[in-house]
Image (spheres, rainbow, N blue to C red):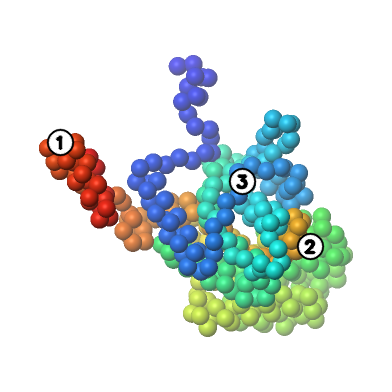
Amino acid sequence: MPKKKRSLLQIPQGTESFYLEDAYRHRKLVERVTEQFYRWGYLPVQTPIVDYYDSYRSLLTENADRGIYRLIDRDGELLMLRSDVTLFLAKQMGMILKSEELPVRVYYADTILRHEAADDISQNEFFQAGIELIGREELEGELEVLGLLQETLATLGARNTVTHVGTRKLTAGIRARLGESAERRLVHAVIMRREEELAEILADYSTKQREAYLSLFRYIGNASGLRVLRETVAKELGEEVTSALLEIEHVFAVLEELNLVDCFRVDLSEVGNQPYHSGMVFQSYMHNVAQPIASGGRYDGLLARFGLDAPSVGFACMLRRVEEQLDARTQPGQISGIEPFATAQGESFVERFRTARQARGQGESIVL
């Protein structure tokens, strides 16, 4: 078969399709997760699949910009496919919400498309289910979102998960002193754990200040260890950093009261991988899964770019990453497979149709 003709019988690299039982389980899991969101008081939203690229250009990191899919509309305008629901949702909510309507709680469950790794073309299509809490500035917003995240992972049947919590506020002083470009370089170096590059970026700071920052970005542990570290670096790094660390300590104290703290870990290398992150950030990890299964955080300035200055915090769960790790023993409830359908009884099609209609009215699934 000629190469061009053969390619028409394939789907593009990186796209995803699944059928029958897999599709059924996916749909049922989505229903369970979105029902959970609704029980917490969140209402559904639907974002467009394409939007104008220029609306988001300044909000994309260099890597994110390379990873998006672009297209030209019939009027010659440059569009982008939805690569991050939060971005598209921020524009939508920023344009229609009014301050007197806050707080607003919304959820979504939809597909995004983006190219995540230059050396991996196996997956570019992902399914995100997530929530956004708009209009809550105090730390109860973070606590609500973290609590719902943990219940969502439990609803999915995700086991052996831990959520790492950090804060973007650690870099705010660096941005003020060295500029936004330096902060972006520093965030990337922190995420990649490149200490030599970090030290180079922080070269304008004193040796003690530089070492204090490095000790923060290395820290992964519990709130008790964070308290000791905070007391050590407070003198060198000042009130802003101290306040950010105290916020994390407060959140972990409440998580401990709720008996949830074992599911969370302080990780100050979590500084947020999006330019719009402004405060506490987090990522959830699952045993045997290379990439985070969920991520989120606070992004107080994002909606203001689209008309409404409202504090916001939320998370997105990469649903298919979790589903791929589930088997019949870990599937929640009775959705590990499809039971064989009953067959309607009757001599004629009319009899079978009437029998099936009556059975379906009583909640049964039946074929003719």
Q: Is residue 152 left or right of residue 249?
A: left
From this viewpoint, is residue 189 visible?
no
Which residue is identified by label 3? Answer: 48
Query: Label 3: how many residues lie within 10 Å, few (<14), some (14-19) or many (20+)?
Result: few
Q: Position of residue 188 (x, y in %)?
A: 71, 56
Residue 184 image-quadrant placement? bottom right
Residue found at the far left of this picture? 347
Image: 160 above or below 361: below
Q: Is residue 243 visible?
A: yes
Disc 2 to disc 3, C-alpha distance: 42 Å
Give the percent coordinates (x, y) of residue 127.
52, 49
Crowd rating for badge 1 (residues with CA inside 10 Å; few <14, some 14–19, many 20+): few
Q: Earlier in the sequence, mark 1 or mark 2?
A: 2
Closest to the camera, between mark 1 and mark 2, is 1
From the image, state whether disc 2 or disc 3 is nearer to you. 3
Q: Which residue is mark 2?
A: 199
Q: Label 2 is placed on what type of residue?
A: Ala
Of 226 and 66, nearer the camera is 66
Q: Residue at x 58, y 61 (%)?
A: 106
Secondary structure of the residue carrying numbered label 2: helix
Quarter occupied by residue 271: bottom right
Query: Residue 47 location in percent, x, y?
Result: 60, 50
Q: Residue at x 45, y 40 (%)?
A: 17
Residue at (70%, 63%) from the top-left corner? 98
Q: Residue at image x 22%, y 50%? A: 358
* Left-right relation of 244 to 35: right
Amino acid type at mark 3: Pro
Secondary structure of the residue carrying tag 1 is loop
Among numbered discs 3 and 1, the one appearing first in the sequence: 3
Image location (x, y in percent) of residue 159: 43, 64
Q: Which residue is mark 1?
A: 348
